[in-house]
Image: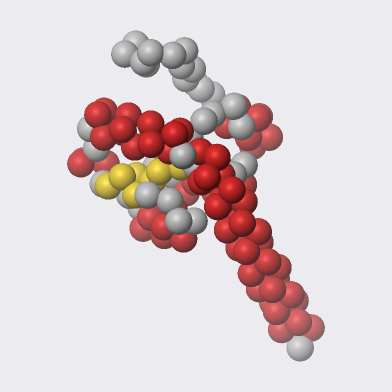
Amino acid sequence: MAHMRSEAYLLNEPVQPRVFMGLLARAQAVAAMRLHAAILAAALHLPALGIAYDPKVEGVVTDLGLPILGQPGELTAERLAEGLGELILRREELGNALRNRVAELQALAEENATLAVSLLRG
């Protein structure tokens, strides 16, 4: 954090999802190493790049049409800064694409839920 050019904050304690969403909504881009960070960023139509810590993260980020930066051991500060900088430059374009992709995925999730309920009533 000491090397950042802009103000940075560290969350030392867990926060409620709504609080985290409010904080995340102020970001310009996200580096997502955990699944929920990628999902919450997508819900906000916020461009994210994935750090392939887990196959789930890689799958979600790829399905959203966003870049994977690589494995944690391959990550450098320069690569991270470059990747985030590119997302910020393209945030309007990527945000619109995310808006469309999230709507598609929500429709698919609703279809799955409807199918699951119909199977339970079977």
For this orientation, the residue located farthest to the left is 74
Residue 96 pos. (x, y %): 59, 48
Number of callouts in the render? 0
Give the residue at x 26% y 46%: 71
Give the residue at x 38% y 46%: 50
Q: Is residue 42 above or below residue 13?
A: below
Is any atom of residue 30 visible in this view? no
Is any atom of residue 91 visible in this view? yes
Q: Is residue 116 above or below residue 95?
A: below
For this orientation, the residue located farthest to the bottom is 122
Please tell me in which quadrant of the rendered image residue 22 appears.
Answer: top right
Quadrant of the image containing the N terminus: top left
Quadrant of the image containing the C terminus: bottom right
Coloration of the structure image: secondary structure
Q: Is residue 16 above or below residue 2?
A: below
Q: Is residue 102 above or below residue 92?
A: below
Residue 76 pos. (x, y %): 23, 32
Residue 86 pos. (x, y %): 38, 36
Residue 23 pos. (x, y %): 60, 27
Give the residue at x 32% y 29%: 81
Please tell me in which quadrant of the rendered image residue 80 appears.
Answer: top left
